[in-house]
Image: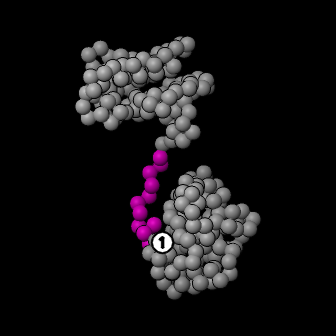
Amino acid sequence: MRILLIEDDDKVTEFVARSLREHGNTVDAVRDGREGLLMGASQIYDAMIIDRMLPGLEGLAIIRTLRASGNRTPVLILTTKTQVADRVEGLEAGGDDYLVKPFAFTELHARLNALVRRPPMATVETVLHVHDLEMDLLKRTVTRAGQPIAVQPQEFKLLEYLMRNAGRVVTRTMLLEGVWDFHFDPLTKVVETHVSRLRSKVDKGFDAELIHTIRGAGYVLRAPE
């Protein structure tokens, strides 16, 4: 494997780089965050090991920048931080795994091998579009023609389901199972009520209707022809 190690602690750098090379890997080691970002963005690596606390540019900023540019090289984060919130922050920034200092090299090597064995991640869709309707799944926002639309959490789930199935008729049963996780009919008008509320927010005041009732079948969200 060709590995980029971005770590400013001389002892850790020497220990990790030497051990990896002894196992047949090629290692580029840098101690400055900005230099590490430049290396990671301009060279091809099988994996990267990135410390969180770095001079020049901290580790999570490096990872976020690489991910924003489309770089999907597996990243193992090194840190002295032990709190769950810190690990979550690192993973949400785009890291693939987390290792807390001090650590055994055998564990680091095993984690690297596991990361490299993983199949490449498919591009995750985070923004849905149908006509002029947009849903940002990360920001949890909905807009139509650039105008913000305020929706409740359950309305958001319902709209997401409809948008992911845009152009296809979805039945009441499909909505009960896919949105409410009901595997039985509660004999209420929960679907009809929520669709009606959602339609008033998504379609009212706009030139074209997007949410349509298909009598005897269900509902469909589709762009105007």
Q: Identify whether 30 is placed above or below 70.
A: below
- Can residue 26 be seen in the rendering of this structure? no
Name the residue rendered at 57%, 57% in the picture. Answer: 85
Q: Position of residue 106 (x, y in %)?
A: 47, 80
Q: Residue 4 or 136: which is nearer the viewer? A: 136
Name the residue rendered at 48%, 32% in the picture. Answer: 153
- Label 1 Cα crowd, 10 Å radius (few <14 / some 14-19 / many 20+): many
Q: Position of residue 39 (x, y in %)?
A: 65, 67
In the image, is 187 to the left or to the right of 109? left
Magenta span: 113-124
Q: Quadrant of residue 221?
A: top left
Q: Position of residue 80 (x, y in %)?
A: 61, 70
Name the residue rendered at 30%, 25% in the picture. Answer: 172
- Can residue 3 be seen in the rendering of this structure? yes
In the image, is 11 to the left or to the right of 225? right
What residue is shown with label 1?
A: 112
In the image, is 77 to the left or to the right of 188? right
Q: Residue 41 or 33: which is nearer the viewer? A: 33
In the image, is 3 to the left or to the right of 220? right
Amino acid on which disc 1 is placed: Leu
Q: Identify whether 64 is placed above or below 191.
A: below
Farthest left residue in view: 184
